[in-house]
Amino acid sequence: MPLEIACDESGSEGEKLIGGQTDVFAHAGVRLSIEEAADCLAELRRRIRSPAVEYKANHLLRTKHRRVLEWFLGSLGPVRGRAHVYLVDKKLLLANELRGLLGLDVSPDDGLLAAFNDVLRTRNRRDPAAGSFFAMAGDSGELRAKVAELRDAKVLDPLVPAILRAVGRWSEDGEPVFLVHDEQPSLKGERLAEIEASPGLAGLKFVDSRTDPRVQVADFLVGVARRIAEDELNGNGDAVLTALLAPYVDSKSLWN
């Protein structure tokens, strides 16, 4: 029997890495049975005591539920040692791609970085965004060809690399992995084929998170992980929560 891992993401905005709603992308995988996940959710409900029909990460992130959050992430909680989180600093991802293209280190607040994001997202070669980037970076046939290649490869969307990393992480011991993932309408065609061809993957199923308690637990974990990481990135970090999150963070995360 393959190892079943339930997954969810937070902060996915496709290739929009600058100017979106989030600065961090996070993807989590948890190794729990359906019964264990259901027990975890029941305990969260017992501790949080909210009348909400569906619990989300925001419930755990409220100040009044701080002790519940610390329990959830802590050494005596339900997911310690049975979950991992892959984090991506979106601006760092973009800066790395630009460095590879131009050989330049660019500040996260540099206008060239935003223009680079725009030019890779546009499908209209005459879009003003394209002109802005090439005006700053230098307009040459070689550069335009490289940008077109990056654009076609969709290198900016971290979702597929995150799922591939989840497969790699959980199959490290040679055990095939079956992923149960929250629904992702954007994964189709070549992108889905790339995931399905991943070594170590025994299968992949997309589900409505409300129908699988394991995915709901992954949703809790990934939501709080993204917020903790984002606060840390923006200089508002909580040392206790950052330390509690650290054991979950994948070593290959694109993180500072």
Image (cartoon, helix red, strand yellow):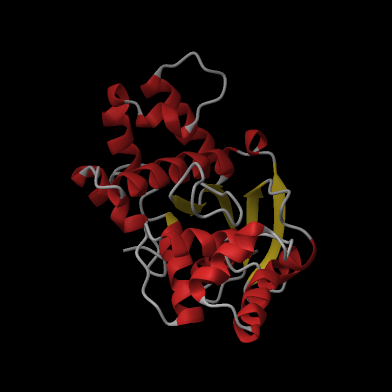
- Between 131 and 41, which is closer to the camera in this rendering? 131
Does residue 153 appear in this view?
yes
**Residue that extends furthest to the left in the rendered view of this protein:** 239
**Left/right of residue 63 with respect to residue 141 in the rendered view:** left
Q: Residue at x 35, y 39 (%)?
A: 72
Q: Residue at x 51, y 66 (%)?
A: 170
**Residue that extends furthest to the top in the rendered view of this protein:** 51
Q: Quadrant of residue 164?
A: bottom right
Q: Residue at x 29, y 56 (%)?
A: 246
Q: Quadrant of residue 45?
A: top left
Find residue 69 and report its horizontal and vertical position in percent. 32, 35
Q: Is residue 46 depicted above or below 106 in this figure?
A: above
Find residue 221 and report its horizontal and vertical position in percent. 44, 44
Find residue 128 and report its horizontal and vertical position in percent. 64, 58
Q: How many marks?
A: 0
- Between 212 and 122, which is closer to the camera in this rendering? 122
Q: Is residue 103 depicted above or below 202 in this figure?
A: below
Q: Quadrant of residue 43?
A: top left
- Between 18 and 174, which is closer to the camera in this rendering? 18
Which quarter of the rendered picture does the C terminus lie within?
bottom left
**Residue that extends furthest to the right in the rendered view of this protein:** 189
Which quarter of the rendered picture does the N terminus lie within?
bottom right
Does residue 178 appear in this view?
no
Q: Residue at x 67, y 35 (%)?
A: 211
